[in-house]
Every structure is written in structure tokens, then in C-alpha cells.
Image: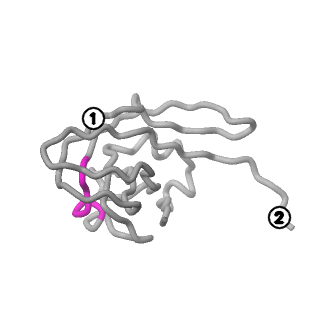
Amino acid sequence: MPYFAHADVLENGPAYVKANATKILLISGYTFGDSFATVNAAKLSEAAVTTANWTWSASGNDRVLTSTDNLTGSVAAASAAGPSNHYAVVDATNSKVLYVTEEGSDQPITSGNPITLKSVVIKATQPTLAV
């Protein structure tokens, strides 16, 4: 499963996602480096987000940014069940894909039904010694 973090996120950390994310998309598939247009065309559902939809917590010495659980998304398209579904956190205002991670439930999406998006979790880990 491909994962992705935009250069702005790599340079500025998860706080950049919190400050700039406008939508979380459920997409039917992702290939590393897909453009915003490609990701937007692959969306099955979307939910709008603001800074209020993100919270910080700790996991040991790491910092964790988590989106609101159970966001309700509007259905854009139907799809079969499959392990290729991903969440894409985007800045739609500036046409940027900020962060992509796997969705994980592999449930089919039925056109006309509401979608409940689970939390997106972004972890900033403590540095470790490279050997």
C-alpha cells in the first residue's frame, strides 16, 4: 500500500496538515506521487475538515495528530470492496495532496449510501540512532 506526505508536511510536520487540510477523501486507489487531479478523480467520498477536526495527543514520546472520527462523507461514486482504498488529506484550495494512508476496512461502497470516515492518524516520531 502506498503512503505519501507532501514536501510541505515533511518540512513543517503534521501541524501543517492541521493548518491547511480542507478535505479528507476516500479514494479508490493511490500510486505514490499521484497529482491532486488524479486523486480527486479517484474519490469515492469526501468530508470537509477544518483545524477544529484535528487533535494532538501523545504516544510515549511521540506526538500524534488525529482527525475527528466518524466524519460523514457524501458519496461520489460506488466501488467494489478491495484493499486499494486510501484516505487522502488534501488542501483543495491550493490543489495539494498533503497526506495519504490506507483506509483498511476493505468495505464495498454503495452509491446513494452515506459514508462514515474513520480517523486519519499522523505520527511524528522521536529521532532514533541510525546505525
Sequence-first tag of 2 and 1:
1
- Is 81 rendered above or below residue 114? below
Question: Which of these two is toward me, 9 or 107?
Answer: 107
- Residue 28 circle label: none
* Residue at the disc numbered 1: 72
Q: What element carries label 1?
A: strand
Magenta segment: does it hold 65?
A: no
Name the residue type under label 1.
Thr
The image position of residue 38, as x and y in percent, is 27, 68
Magenta segment: does it hold 43?
A: yes
Name the residue type under label 2.
Ala
Q: Residue at point 34% right, 46% down?
A: 24
User: Quick one: label 2, few (<14), some, or many (20+) residues within 10 Å?
Assistant: few
Quadrant location, the C terminus: bottom right
Of all residues, the one furthest to the left in this rendering is 112
Q: Residue at point 42% right, 32% down?
A: 68
Q: Residue at point 75% right, 38% down?
A: 61
The image position of residue 94, as x and y in percent, is 30, 55
Magenta region = 39-45
Q: Residue at point 40% right, 33% down?
A: 51
User: Quick one: label 1, few (<14), some, or many (20+) residues within 10 Å?
Assistant: some
Question: Which of these two is toward me, 120 or 63?
Answer: 120
Q: What element carries label 2?
A: loop
The image position of residue 79, as x and y in percent, is 23, 58
Disc 2 and disc 1 in contact, CB within 8 angstroms: no
* Residue at the disc numbered 2: 130
- Is 5 rendered above or below residue 24? below
Residue 1 falls left or right of residue 125: left
Q: In which quarter of the image is residue 102?
A: bottom left
C-alpha gap between disc 2 and disc 1: 42 Å
